[in-house]
Image (cartoon, helix red, strand yellow):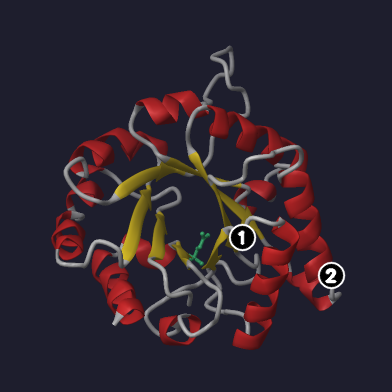
Amino acid sequence: MTNKYVYFIANWKMFGDLRTVNSLDKVIKFSKNIQKNKIKLIYCPPSTLIQSLSNKLKKTRIEVGAQNCHHNFDFGAYTGQINSKMLKGVGAKYVILGHSENRQSGETDQLINIKIKSALKAGLKIIFCIGETLKEKKNKKTKQVLAKQLKNGLKSIKDKSNIIIAYEPVWSIGSGLIPKSKELNSLITFIKIKFGRKIPKILYGGSVNIMNIEKLKKVNGIDGFLIGGASQNTKKFIDIIKKTIN
Ligand code: PGA
């Protein structure tokens, strides 16, 4: 871990309803007792819950983000879509882009690049996901894949100060598997070098849980975690945070 504050980003995916929003009372209470500069807590619920979550978290230090957005900055005839301005309008401060679950359903690097630009223009901060598949890993293509995703995804974006990178190996998401610490550290260093002069915040994501957090927190250079499954359970999520910062 780096010695700055640690990011914990909850990616609820397509889970959650108004009852789940109320379950955050425990997290709010917990976060009030933590020193201000120790953690940065961000919840990314489904779009349907962004507004109620933002209202609930108004007087707290916990922030809200979205899980994706349409690439068009302007309003338009795109049935079923939501753009970055709309997300910002209901209280989102961040948006996850390039998540492998969306790449797998057809999102290209080029489309992600347009989405990032549009979301930055709307004033959102970006959690930009990159990661290799198992096949790419086995073929020793990991660095090549990460370099390509970074290069194409960030093409012609000059000011990258509002972009956080989340390294999420596709084979690790939801599988219970995590990379070896040495390997993870070397990839984090690689991403930092590739990103350019301004060193970004880099998060790790993929099967982060109460059992492996002790190991993950010891990996140098990681600024925090993007957590899926385990973030949907308030107790588990709080336990992961406690284990990381204590
Ligand atoms: P997971 O998901 O923690 O359930 O593996 C992480 C993610 O997809 O962001």
Which residue is more in the foreground, 209 or 105? 209
Residue 213, disc: none
In this picture, residue 112 sits left or right of residue 231: right
Q: Which residue is mark 1?
A: 199
Residue positioned 21% across, 36% down in the render: 55
Decide: is 142 above or below 81.
below
**Nearest to viewer (mark 1 / mark 2):** 1
- Could you say whether the residue bearing mark 2 is in a helix, strand or loop? loop
Upstream in the sequence, badge 1 or badge 2?
2
Mark 1 surroundings within 10 Å by alpha-carbon count, few (fewer than 14), some (14 through 19), many (20 or more): some
Whole-Å distance between the Cαs marked 1 and 2? 23 Å
- Could you say whether the residue bearing mark 1 is in a helix, strand or loop? loop
Q: Which residue is mark 2?
A: 141
Q: Which residue appears farthest toward the front when viewing the image?
A: 197
Is residue 161 in sight in this rendering?
yes
Decide: is 16 above or below 186.
above
- The percent coordinates of residue 219 (x first, y second) are 54, 82
Is residue 132 in sight in this rendering?
no
What amino acid type should be assigned to the residue bearing mark 2? Lys
- The percent coordinates of residue 226 (x first, y second) are 47, 62
Q: Quadrant of residue 135?
A: bottom right
Is the CB of mark 2 within 8 Å of ligand 1? Answer: no
Residue positioned 32% across, 64% down in the render: 39
- The percent coordinates of residue 100 (x first, y second) are 64, 54
What amino acid type should be assigned to the residue bearing mark 1? Ile
Residue positioned 41% across, 30% down in the render: 88
In this picture, residue 217 sits left or right of residue 201: left
- The percent coordinates of residue 118 (x first, y second) are 60, 29
